[in-house]
Image: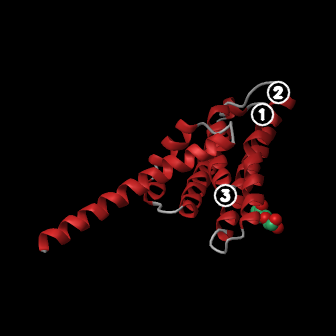
Amino acid sequence: MKFFVSFVMCLLLLNGFTTAQNLILDSCKKASARDAQLKLDFCVQSLESDPQSKAATTLEGLVIASAKSAASKTISVKGTIQRILNDKKASAGIEMILRDCVELYGDATDSINEALTSVPSGDYDTVKVNLSAALDAPANCEDGFMEKRHQKSPFANEGNICRLKILIPLAFTNML
Ligand SMILES: *[C@@H]1O[C@H](CO)[C@@H](O)[C@H](O)[C@H]1NC(C)=O
C-alpha cells in the first residue's frame, strides 16, 4: 500500500512537470501560429529562462510572468539609454531623441504595470489596450532616430528584443 501511494505520488509529480513544460511550448506554438512576428524559438527561450514563467501552471499565470519579464526589459533598455546620455561623446547631437526614448520606455513600463493590475479581474480588454500601448514604445523610439538622424538607434537590437518580449504577453492575452 505504501509502495502504491509512493508510486502514484511519483506519477502525479511527473505529470505536473510535463504539464508545466507543455504549457510554455503549447502556448508559444499557438501564439507564433497566430502572429508571424513572434518566433517560436524566441518565445520558448525567453520563457524557459524566466523562473516565474517556468513555474506558471495556467495561461493567465504565463501572461503575468511574461508581462513582468517584459517590464524588466523596458527598465533595462531605459538604463542603456541613460548610460548613453551620460556619455557626452556618445550622445552628442542625439540628446533630444534619447530623452524622448527614455520617456517612451518609462511610459511603457507604466503601461505594462497597469496591464498587470487588470489580469486578476479578467478585464482582458484593458490588459490588451495597456500592453498595445507599451508595444509601440520601441518602434516610436526607433522612428525618432530614423526621422531625425536617418539611422538606427545605438540600441536598436535591444529595443527590438524588448518589443518582442512585450508581444508575448499580448499574444497570450489574445488567447485567453
Ligand atoms: C490602460 O488602459 C486604460 C483603459 O483603456 C486607460 O484608461 C489607461 O490610461 C491605460 N494606462 C496606461 C498607463 O497606458
Whole-percent x, y for residue 155 in the image? 65, 34
Name the residue beneath numbered marker 1: 94
Q: Work out how far the residue at label 3 is from the one at label 1, CA to CA, in angstroms.
A: 36 Å
Q: Is residue 13 left or right of residue 163?
A: left
Q: Amino acid at mark 1?
A: Ile
Q: Is residue 123 left or right of residue 28?
A: right
Q: Work out how far the residue at label 2 is from the one at label 1, CA to CA, in angstroms.
A: 8 Å
Secondary element at image label 1: loop
As displayed, is residue 79 above or below residue 144? below
- Residue found at x 68% / y 36%: 36
Q: Amino acid at mark 2?
A: Arg
Query: Residue 37 falls in which quadrant of the image?
Result: top right
Instruction: State which quarter of the image contains the C terminus.
Output: bottom right
Question: Residue lying farthest right?
Answer: 147
Whole-percent x, y for residue 41 in the image? 53, 36
Comes first in the chain, label 2 or label 1: 1
Instruction: State which quarter of the image contains the N terminus.
Output: bottom left
Q: Are marks 3 and 1 in contact (CB under 8 Å)?
A: no
Name the residue beneath numbered marker 3: 173
Q: Are marks 2 and 1 in contact (CB under 8 Å)?
A: yes
Q: Nearer the viewer, residue 168 or 145?
A: 168
Mark 3: give few (<14), some (14-19) or many (20+) Cα within 10 Å. Answer: many
| Quadrant position of ligand 1 | bottom right
Q: Work out how far the residue at label 3 is from the one at label 2, CA to CA, in angstroms.
A: 36 Å
Whole-percent x, y for residue 50 in the image? 46, 51
- Residue found at x 54% / y 63%: 61
Q: From this viewpoint, is residue 81 visible?
A: no
Q: Amino acid at mark 3?
A: Thr
Name the residue beneath numbered marker 2: 149
User: Of the residues tagged 3 and 1, which is closer to the observer?
Assistant: 3
As displayed, is residue 95 above or below residue 25? above
